[in-house]
Amino acid sequence: MKIDEFGVAHERRCCASYKSNIWSYDFVQSLSSEFTAPSYKARAEELKEEFRQLWGQVSDFSKLHIIDSISKLGLSYVFHKEIKEALGGMISCLDNASGFRDDLQSTSLCFRLLRQHGYNISQDLFINLIDEMGFLKEGVHSNLTGVLELFEASHLAVHGEGLLVKAKAFSGQYLINNRKNMDVDLGNRVAHALELPCHWRVTWFDVRQQIHAYELKEDKNPILLELAKLNFNICQGLHLQDLQELSR
């Protein structure tokens, strides 16, 4: 710290010694990606059709977890029509899905997906599960995965939804207190959510990590997994081509 003649303090800054930029024109032009080849795009189209055939065999409420995986894997734009139709069908029959509404994980996931896709779903969907203080009601069967889904869903609360605000505080603290009881996979998911909920993340920047996490799941869909990897690499190849064009 140095004081000048006017009595003003000036902090002496250290030299940063930044490394030189490696992204020269020649370096950018030397990069390449095999995934821009037509054969990879053709394989991606085959996988899309295979998945659509499987999609038609799944019941509406069973599609919730698949839709969540599709979104996290960066494939929402590929199956936009299928997702819209499935969620539209769900919201029209929620009142008759009494067994479904008694399950914390499914209810929380349904609420989050509907809110994320623009549906005006009420917080009253949780009325059978959460009391006025935001705690789980006595007798509600839950597990840590269900509480994690509640924590994620609570971040889509709007002004005046005090129930979800209280549920956010409860579920967040519950997850922190029980991290020692989680396996590695769930522990990583909880840490990821506590750091930044999925609703607040930029999906594409998170895709690579989500693909890795999905690959470790026992109930993963191999078609969806291969398509997610292929789609990611194809998009990265297209971004590289754009970068090369812009640098000329």
Image (cartoon, rainbow, N blue to C red):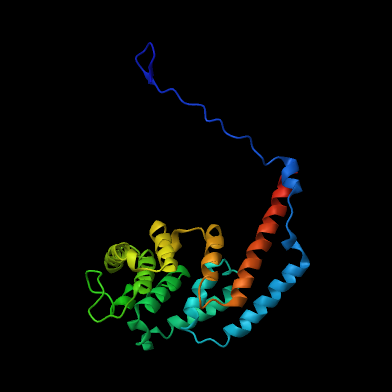
Tell me residue 167's x, y (percent). Answer: 29, 67
Extreme top residue here? 5
- Is residue 136 in view from this perspective? yes
Figure disc tally: 0
Vertical position of residue 196 compared to residue 226: above or below: above
Tell me residue 188's x, y (percent). Answer: 43, 63
**Foreground residue among 141 and 90:** 141
**Foreground residue among 47 and 188:** 188
Q: Quadrant of residue 10?
A: top left
Vertical position of residue 70 compared to residue 13: above or below: below
- Is residue 78 in view from this perspective? no
Tell me residue 113's x, y (percent). Answer: 45, 72
Q: Classify the position of the N terminus by image quarter.
A: top left
Q: Classify the position of the C terminus by image quarter.
A: top right
Q: Residue at x 35, y 72 (%)?
A: 144
Extreme right residue here? 38
**Foreground residue among 235 and 209:** 209
Viewed as shown, does residue 236 lie left or right of 148?
right
Q: Quadrant of residue 11?
A: top left
Q: Residue at x 29, y 78 (%)?
A: 129
Tell me residue 170's x, y (percent). Answer: 27, 65
Q: Residue at x 47, y 58 (%)?
A: 201
Q: Residue at x 73, y 49 (%)?
A: 244
